[in-house]
Amino acid sequence: MDLVILNGRLVNFEKNRLEAKNIGIKKGKIYTITSAEITGKEVVDARGHVISPGFIDIHNHCDYNFHTGNTDPFETSRHLLLMGVTTSIGGNCGSGSVNIKKYFDFIDTYGAPNNYMGFVGHRALREAAGIKDVYACASKTEIKVMQQLAREAIEAGGIGISLGLEYSPGASFEEVIQVCSVLRDYPGRLISAHFRYDGNRSLEAIRELVDISKETGIPMQVSHLNSGVCFGYASEALKMLETARQEGTDVMADAYPYNAASTSAGSAVFDEGCFERWDADYQDIMVAEGEYAGKRCNRELFLHIRAKHPDTRFIMFVMDEKEVDEVMLHPLVMVASDGNINNGCGHPRTAGTFPRALQRYASGKRDEALICMIEKMTRLPAQRLGLTMKGKLTEGADADIVVLNPKELKDNATYDNPVLPPSGIEYVLLNGKIVVEQGKILNDRGGKSIKKIGNHHQV
Ligand SMILES: [Zn+2]
């Protein structure tokens, strides 16, 4: 073997238990899983540790820094890697670049910290079609341009189209249907969607997303459900998703285990009415970067930053924590970071989501709780994305693996210091090679692009 992992306890989803086995890895794949003694050129002793498939982060913004060019292109991706993310899905919330091919080419040349898949964003399509005002409706011609650009991005290997309806209030239901209908020609694609409204209008927004999926026939991944509905609407929203699925509409969701959200100050999210929607006030908003980093807002600071520094991100402490837990534990919800770190600033979810979810919902509980949470980070997103060789520990599967110490698991990132790496993620293997050892990155170029071409994935 190229590498063996000995004496660990492996996650087995079929049997819903941890099993003491050795793993042998050859040429980037899991070659054998056995109770027998095996040897390899490299040995990882995993005694006392749990072996999980590598985490698949189905919702983040890992490609944002590359396309904006305003910082190290892999900054977000490295924080994701340190918490065990081996496959990262960028381009979400409508922001994924129209030129997705550019990032694929970059990774194909230089490698990346994680394997990468990406969405093309509806907001980016609107901008490329020449729509400057987010409150403007698209004309027929502009919709045609968007459809053509969407086709090109999908044919370059994009996994689907992401929507950011809260950021582009002018986009009508009809426009969205027409743009997303392009995906009907490409099997296995997804729509991911940042809802049109959060807080007290979130249920009508979830309804719209269900209707988009129903109308187009394309599976719908509702993005960061927590930040939409954890304002007294979580139970009802989850019921809506359950009912939609029973009626044959393929909707699922993802969420991150924090009760604060984050986005750019200049976005439409903070336009008139946001505090009413959230039942919140200026003091519930913290500035995440720049001159006023760490400060809570008052009316003056809020307006000043929105007007003068619209790219500055705010962190909004507006969700109900119990409801966040309810969302995270629901079987239709996957764990995803929504991560985006820029020059060391941002929300701690980028560096903490996965270990935090494991610690918060599984620590000190029976093994089943840990397996259930790991499934939301591995098998479920793999199935959602059609990644048949990932998200599981079986012979022949890709050797993307996390060795974790369940007793030490902890997110350390905070709102004051959002980039502190977690504890308890002992080893991360990516495409069969050790890339993280005891919290240190050994190689941040082991990741490959995963393009969806035709009906299958091309690595
Ligand atoms: Zn979003």
Image (cartoon, helix red, strand yellow):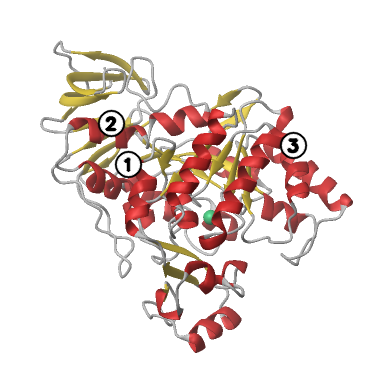
Point out the image quarter for the N terminus: top left
What separation in Å lies between label 2 and label 3 (alpha carbons)? Answer: 37 Å
User: What amino acid type is highlighted by mark number 2?
Assistant: Ser
Left or right placement of residue 292 versus residue 270 in this view: left
Residue plotted at (33% across, 67% down): 415
**What residue did someone put label 1 on?**
84
Residue plotted at (55% across, 71% down): 274
Q: Residues within 10 Å of mark 1 (few under 14, many from 20)?
A: many
Residue plotted at (51% across, 73% down): 275
**What residue did someone put label 3 on?**
181
Tell me where residue 2 appears, x and y as whole percent. 28, 21
Q: Are marks 2 and 1 in contact (CB under 8 Å)?
A: yes
Q: Is residue 208 above or below residue 318?
A: above
Q: Residues within 10 Å of mark 3 (few under 14, many from 20)?
A: some
Please, which residue is most extreme toward the bottom here?
300
**What residue did someone put label 2 on?**
52
